[in-house]
Image (cartoon, rainbow, N blue to C red):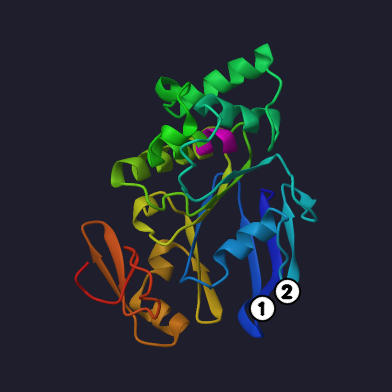
Amino acid sequence: MTPVLSVRGASLERDGRTLWEGLDLDVRPGEMLAVLGPSGSGKTTLMRAVLGLDRLSAGTITALGEPVRRAGNRAIGYVPQQRPLPRDTALRGRDLVQLGVDGHRFGFPFPRRRTHARVDELLAAVGASGFADRDAGTLSGGEQQRLRVAQALADEPRLVLCDEPLTSLDLANQQAVVALIERHRRQKDAGILFVTHDINPVLDKVDRILYLAGGHFTLGTPDEVLTTEVLSRLYGVPVFVLRAGGRVVVVGAPDAEEPHLHHDEESHA
């Protein structure tokens, strides 16, 4: 089975410091791979390199059979972090989705019957039909993120990159967004690269984890990676992995400036 994404010999350096090196990675069709690690570990840079927006210090990337040289591959879907749109955004919800269908990033695309039909189909698929004609800036964070998912899936991509798409969303909206991405994966046999700080919302969906930390990385199934022994070795300090009620908490990881569920310096989570 030909991978939808292949990374070979990849290394990343920043400010004279090696974040990781020698990364070989394949993402297969239908596979969800989560990328975890503390802030500054190079998670987003890896994703931007796949999109052709940034460069690694060494190595090659092949996406959907093509060497990545520049941005703009419409066969790759991209779901960004949830960031509120300005309230005066001069676009309706359906206009945002139409940007993905038409391939425009700026300005207003020229409406066509086929485009309208595809936009309506995508809006229905993400449960956004009811607010599609409201001003996008007045929508909730969860509603806006549903529209971003619809935009990312407009071209039925075989590779979808998700850069912390659940940030700032409540539990219900996290579950909704994960369900939309999971449905696309299963229906289209798409590969998913999912960058996240908190593994718990996708723990039962993930096939493998790439964990970046301490200048190194580890790659394997959740059961192989999320252990006290493996993460202690990766961070170079004692780290404890706690499991309760189907959730995972990492205690003692040296990135406590980020108060999220996956890492926790205290044991009260």
The amino acid sitting under disc 1 is Glu
Q: Classify residue 73 as left or right of residue 140.
A: right
Asked if the residue at tag 2 contacts the one at tag 1, i.e. Cβ–Cβ closer than 8 Å, the answer is: yes
Image quarter hosting the C terminus: bottom left
Badge 1 local density, few (<14 within 10 Å), some, or many (20+)? some
Membership of 150 in magenta stretch: yes
What residue does disc 2 label?
A: 57
Label 1 sits on a secondary structure element that is strand
**As displayed, is residue 148 above or below residue 223?**
above
Membership of 145 in magenta stretch: no
Q: Nearer the viewer, residue 236 or 78?
A: 78
Q: Earlier in the sequence, mark 1 or mark 2?
A: 1
**As displayed, is residue 123 above or below residue 226?**
above
Q: Classify residue 173 as left or right of residue 71.
A: left
Question: Is any atom of residue 269 visible in this view?
Answer: yes
Q: How many marks?
A: 2
In percent of width and height, residue 203 lies at 37, 54
Q: Nearer the viewer, residue 202 or 259?
A: 259
Q: Residue at x 40, y 41 (%)?
A: 141
Q: Residue at x 36, y 47 (%)?
A: 169
What residue does disc 1 label?
A: 13
In percent of width and height, residue 155 lies at 65, 32
Question: Is any atom of residue 184 visible in this view?
Answer: no
Q: Classify residue 258 as left or right of residue 115.
A: left
Magenta segment: 148-152
Q: Residue at x 44, y 26 (%)?
A: 128
Badge 2 local density, few (<14 within 10 Å), some, or many (20+)? some
Q: Residue at x 63, y 82 (%)?
A: 18
Q: Residue furthest top?
A: 113
Q: Residue furthest front?
A: 88
In percent of width and height, residue 139 lies at 41, 34
Marks 1 and 2, how far apart in space?
A: 6 Å
